[in-house]
Image (spheres, grey):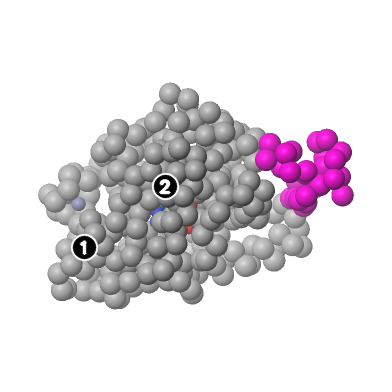
Amino acid sequence: MKCRRCRQPAVIDLRRHNAAFCSDCFLHHCREQVRRAISEFSMFGPEDRILVAVSGGKDSLALWHLLRELGYSADGLYIGLGIGGYSEESEIRTRAFADDHGLTLRVISLPEDHGYDVETAAQRTRRAPCGACGLSKRHLFNRAALDGGYDVVATGHNLDDEAAVLLGNVLHWEPGYLGRQYPVLPATEGFARKVKPLVRLGEREMAAYCVLLGIEYQVEECPMAEGNRHLGYKEVLNDLEARSPGSKAAFLASFFSRGHEFFRDAAGGEQEALHGCVECGSPTTGEVCAFCALRARVVGDTPVTIGRKD
Ligand code: AMP
Ligand code: FES
Ligand code: ZN
């Protein structure tokens, strides 16, 4: 197997691209895919201040590395979720990466700064942990970006993640979720711009990127994620991909280029009715935002119902 670019022996085979690459050309391929995603979706420019949400996993550490390689200035944000040894290991990996590369990392602890952890929130809300976790993370990413004067929040959602979410949204024909599923969500009053620069790269590519560069990442999956329906969607899409290489990327890319526009209006409908949360000032349709309501109920005693993770 020879590298498509330089004809040296290849180390990785990408059936979707009908290509194999040596180590250097594979790293170039990853940078190129991120560069294209940033440009195709006008995610940000060199003058923008970027906050990368870093979990200590392969995707977000690779993303942080790739953005720096491409010449962007990006600080990291880690959120301690209080999920026992899993969170401890994730924080160690994230801090070590930041130290090794001389990068600025901001750390927020859900238990220490907000008085609850994901498991307690799940018990009190009687919902899957991922619901409370996702709601808390999205709120804290946004707050940290606005408070820190960042232009944009970047997350490490990759092609496999986004294709699985898309399959779920299509299976349930969720117009609002489909309208919001896009690699860039523009800033609106009280919300920072959100981008997903890894939409053109799959899970296997991100793991290979870290391994080739010696980036040590949290290999364990979150212990709370068991039974998460997106894991099932990923398996289904992987079966399809094995039969027909390229179908997963085509499913996602065609949605972005041809399908998304039909749902865009469904995503914007709530904007009108938003005002500031009386607790934290974040935009909300109610008196308090979903995060403050969750925190009050979890730190207090009353069960609360929260929305699903999108
Ligand atoms: P997940 O929702 O776990 O699939 O993670 C998707 C993306 O969210 C990751 O690639 C990170 O960019 C971000 N993220 C997840 N967990 C954390 C965390 N604890 N702290 C900061 N960012 C996170
Ligand atoms: Fe959020 Fe696992 S990381 S529930
Ligand atoms: Zn609030």
Residue situated in front as seen by the camera: 275 or 72:
72
Residue at the image position 24 percent from the left and 65 percent from the top = 116
Is the residue indicated by label 2 positioned so its CB lies within 8 Å of ligand 1?
Answer: yes
The amino acid on which the numbered mark 2 sits, given as a three-letter code, is Ala
Which quadrant holds the C terminus? bottom left
x and y percent of residue 56 in the render? 47, 54
Residue at the image position 41 percent from the left and 28 percent from the top = 48
| 205 w.r.t. 193: above or below | below
Q: Quadrant of residue 99?
A: top left
Residue at the image position 28 percent from the left and 69 percent from the top = 121
Tell me the distance, in whole angstroms, between the alpha carbons under discs 1 and 2: 21 Å
Q: Tell me if residue 88 can be seen.
A: yes
| 43 w.r.t. 141: above or below | above
| Residue that carries the numbered disc 1 in the rendered image | 115
| 39 w.r.t. 273: above or below | above
| Residue that carries the numbered disc 2 in the rendered image | 53
Q: Tell me if residue 181 can be seen.
A: no
Mark 1 or mark 2: whose residue is earlier in sequence: 2
- What is the span of residues highlighted in magenta in the rendered image? 1-28
Ligand 1 falls in quadrant: bottom left
Residue 147 shown left or right of residue 60 in the figure: left
